[in-house]
Image: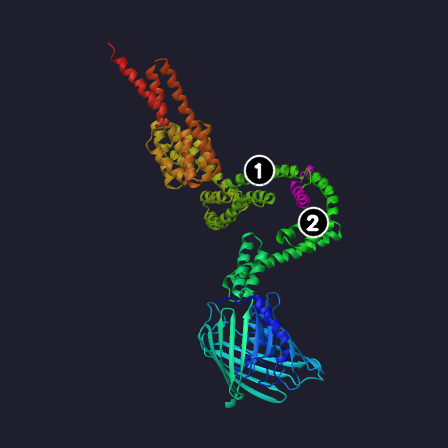
């Protein structure tokens, strides 16, 4: 069915206004309207149209559209006519003109407002004027309806008990004369309804009183289809108080018809909707909210979402948007209030630039903030004047080296005076210098971090963050330092406890080793450093005592005892010069010396004394460099040394020109810490040096090749291929040189 044109509705309403003389004087019921008659004479609950003005104005609140209404009685004479419209900001407004049923009053005018609140509580208020040509009075009507949900089935996540959801309850006081000396006694009404299913039946019970008279009301309704509802009611449980009728809903047109069997009279009600439906308006508002959200305007998005929910309280999409944005906008509101207050204090002190900065920040949050826009227009001349003073202040701060404050000053100027000459240049210069300082602090922190000086490292990283809060690398290292401190604390506590036990047992050497392990984890641990020094002193005293005994045994001609004592000293301090000298005298041959250092390396490795093993292997390399056990023992030592020690060994080998040894150690270090900066640098340097060696051998080979010294050339390329077996140039030219040699050998 097509929607009724608006011009037709206007004609109907004008016709109603001109036909007030047709109002019948016959008294049919206590108040006008078809629906109240079909609910046993009560309209406290179950009314969502203009007739609620005369019964319970809270019934206006659930209606969300624009509606016109006509009620006809007695051979189609007009009982009342009215209109209602919903406004999201205030609620549903309605007005009506109708016949006063009481004798002596032929017409009345009424207007009212209904509004919904959280928890499905509806309230309303109405004013009705009762004229009769000689006297008149104005009456007040108030009411409330509690309706947990619009549907019978509970929604997912609902906090209401299922059995409560179908209930509706209402209370109203109408005809409250604003002039106590005129008008009849007020009318009070209360009602309760319950829907067994969504389609019904819905039953209601009402109770009303006026001037000492009390009336009971019963009503029932049932909807066999979405467009048809059957209704029936009874007053005071009397057979002559029965009424019945139906309600038809066809698109924007609704028709109600009822018949009162006791009074033998009927009524007809007609309502028609104007404009878009509430759901369409809600959908449009939701689309506007989504568009604002995409543009980043959360405040406007929330505004449109709230309007969408006002038009359609069942809109889950609008509820989700409001739930998401409400907290954010509250935070923004708090920030705006704080900025406006700060700006006001700035103005009181005549700090116009600071005030303008705060107003700009407000506009960044809420672009349409009228107060901030007006304030900026008002203080614009003063801002321009003070901008030059701020510019000079920024220059002075820059010259003093206070880059951070200078940047804040120039940024403030650019924010309120975007076209100010010179500001952009200074900001670019400051940003560059700050970036350099940030990098300096960052790399300083990295250096401390690699040395495990975590306190100094964290301080440097925080300085970098102080200049650049968005420098994520520094923030990540701070988080890593905090986590490593937490992890290392347990290990340090365990080692410290064991070291103290070793001290009590006078095992100074083991205690010394434990304190050194603690310092490897936490180099700045002052107590461990102090105890290490003390343990080192006691170990030195013990070594000196043992060395004196060994010398005495040597002098007394007891080589076996001397050898045993000197070896014990080297077990503690592998590089002890005196013990090494005496042992070399006691073991004159290189083979014996090599065997001795091999045994020493084996024992030290079995005991987990990796530094001692490393020293013994260095000595073994001097006496027996071809020992087959050296590579395996070195790999075992490297696997157990900390990263920093490996890097140190790699650096020593590199500086000594032992690039392959350095590369082997650095490779092991990178297995343990792939991101170690110095190890990565050393690896690159080693590989560059190795590549350079390969190039040197290759180039020398080329020189020999051009001089037809093919054997010498092949020897150089063999050296290059020993370093890099995949070197293509050496492979190719070696093949050519070999062909030349073979050709020469075949000559007679």
Q: Residue at x 34, y 32 (%)?
A: 595
Residues at circles 2 and 1 in contact by the CB criterion of under 8 Å: no
Query: Residue 5 at what x, y percent from top left?
Result: 55, 66
Comparing 153 with 446, the one in front is 153
Front in this rendered view, residue 514 or 461: 461
640 is higher (above) or lower (below) than 335? above
Q: Position of residue 517 (x, y in %)?
A: 47, 44
Q: Which quadrant would residue 33 be assigned to in this image?
A: bottom right
The image quarter containing residue 653 is top left
The residue lying at 57 percent from left, 69 percent from top is 9
Please provide the residue range marked out in magenta: 398-418
Which residue does the numbered mark 2 point to in the structure image? 356
Most frequent secondary structure within the magenta stretch: helix
Q: Quadrant of the C terminus?
A: top left
Q: Is residue 405 left or right of residue 150?
A: right
The answer to whether residue 157 is magenta is no
Residue 71 horizontal/vertical position (percent):
57, 77
Q: Mark 2 or mark 1, which has the lower sequence index?
A: 2
Badge 2 local density, few (<14 within 10 Å), some, or many (20+)? many
The disc label shown at residue 440, or none? 1
Q: Is residue 597 visible?
A: yes
Q: Residue at x 54, y 60 (%)?
A: 284
Expressed as whole percent of the image width and height from the top left, the position of residue 724 reads 37, 27
Image quadrant in which you'd find residue 727? top left
Q: Dot 1: few (<14), some (14–19), or many (≥20) neighbours within 10 Å?
A: some
Q: Secondary structure at mark 2?
A: helix
From the viewer's side, name the closer residue of 488 and 40: 40
- CA separation, marks 2 and 1? 35 Å
Camera-side residue of 180 and 433 = 180
């Amino acid at each position: 069915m097509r929607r009724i044109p608006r011009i037709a509705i206007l004609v109907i309403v004008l016709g109603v206004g001109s036909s007030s003389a047709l109002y019948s004087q016959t008294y049919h019921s206590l108040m006008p309207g078809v629906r109240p008659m079909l609910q046993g004479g009560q309209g406290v609950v179950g009314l969502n149209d203009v007739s609620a003005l005369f019964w319970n104005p809270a019934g206006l609140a659930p209606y969300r559209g624009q509606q016109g209404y006509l009620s006809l009685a007695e051979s189609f004479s007009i009982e009342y006519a009215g209109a209602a419209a919903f406004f999201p900001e205030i609620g549903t407004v309605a007005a009506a003109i109708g016949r006063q049923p009481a004798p002596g009053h032929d017409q009345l005018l009424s207007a009212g407002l209904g509004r919904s609140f959280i928890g499905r509580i509806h309230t309303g208020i109405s004013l009705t004027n009762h004229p009769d040509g000689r006297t008149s009075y104005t009456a007040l009507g108030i009411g409330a309806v509690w309706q947990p949900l619009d549907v019978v089935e509970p929604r997912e996540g609902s906090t209401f008990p299922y059995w409560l959801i179908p209930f509706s309850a209402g209370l109203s006081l109408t005809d409250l004369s604003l002039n106590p000396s005129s008008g009849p006694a007020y009318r009070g009404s209360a009602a309760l309804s319950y829907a067994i299913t969504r389609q019904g039946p819905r039953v209601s019970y009402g109770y009303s009183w006026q001037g000492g008279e009390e009336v009971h009301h019963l009503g029932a309704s049932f909807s066999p289809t979405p467009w048809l509802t059957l209704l029936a009611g009874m007053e005071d449980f009397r057979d002559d108080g029965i009424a019945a009728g139906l309600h038809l809903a066809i698109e924007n047109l609704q028709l109600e018809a009822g018949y009162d069997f006791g009074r033998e009279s009927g009524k007809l009600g007609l309502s028609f909707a104007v404009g878009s439906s509430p759901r369409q308006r809600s959908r449009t508002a939701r689309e506007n909210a989504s568009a604002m959200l995409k543009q980043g305007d959360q405040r406007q998005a929330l505004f449109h979402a709230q309007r969408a929910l006002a038009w359609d309280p069942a809109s889950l999409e609008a509820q989700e948007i409001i739930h998401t944005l409400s907290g954010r906008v509250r935070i923004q509101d708090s920030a705006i209030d704080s900025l406006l207050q700060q700006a006001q204090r700035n103005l009181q002190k005549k700090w116009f630039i600071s005030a303008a900065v705060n107003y700009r920040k407000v506009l960044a949050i809420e672009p349409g903030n009228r107060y901030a826009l007006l304030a900026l227009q008002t203080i614009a001349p003063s801002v321009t004047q003070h901008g030059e003073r701020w510019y000079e202040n920024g220059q002075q701060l820059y010259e003093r080296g206070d880059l951070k404050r200078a940047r804040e000053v120039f940024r403030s100027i650019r924010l309120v005076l975007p076209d100010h000459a010179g500001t952009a240049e200074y900001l670019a210069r400051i940003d560059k210098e700050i970036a350099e300082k940030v990098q300096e602090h960052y790399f300083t922190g990295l250096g401390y971090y690699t040395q495990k000086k975590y306190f100094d490292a964290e301080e440097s990283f925080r300085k970098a963050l102080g200049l650049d809060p968005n420098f994520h690398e520094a923030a990540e290292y701070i988080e890593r330092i905090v986590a490593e401190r937490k992890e290392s604390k347990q290990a340090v506590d365990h080692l410290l406890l064991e070291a103290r036990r070793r001290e009590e047992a006078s095992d100074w050497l083991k205690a010394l080793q434990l304190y050194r392990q603690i310092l490897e984890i936490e180099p700045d641990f002052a107590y461990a450093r102090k105890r290490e020094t003390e343990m080192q002193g006691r170990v030195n005293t013990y070594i000196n005592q043992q060395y004196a005994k060994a010398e005495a045994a040597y002098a007394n001609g007891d080589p076996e005892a001397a050898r045993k004592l000197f070896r014990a000293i080297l077990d503690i301090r592998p590089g002890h010069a005196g013990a090494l000298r005496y042992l070399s005298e006691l073991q004159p041959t290189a083979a014996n010396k090599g065997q001795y250092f091999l045994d020493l390396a084996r024992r030290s490795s079995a005991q987990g004394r990796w530094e001692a093993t490393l020293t013994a292997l260095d000595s073994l390399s001097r006496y027996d460099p071809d020992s087959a056990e050296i590579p395996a023992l070195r790999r075992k030592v490297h696997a157990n040394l900390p990263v920093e020690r490996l890097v140190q060994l790699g650096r020593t080998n590199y500086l000594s020109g032992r690039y392959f040894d350095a590369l082997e150690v650095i490779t092991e270090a990178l297995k343990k810490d792939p991101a170690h900066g110095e190890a990565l640098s050393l690896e690159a340097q080693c590989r560059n040096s190795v590549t350079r060696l390969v190039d040197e051998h290759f180039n020398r080979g080329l020189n020999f090749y051009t001089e037809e010294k093919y054997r010498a050339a092949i020897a150089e390329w063999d050296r290059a291929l020993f370093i890099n077996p995949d070197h293509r140039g050496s492979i190719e030219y070696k093949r050519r040189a070999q062909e030349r040699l073979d050709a020469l050998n075949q000559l007679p």
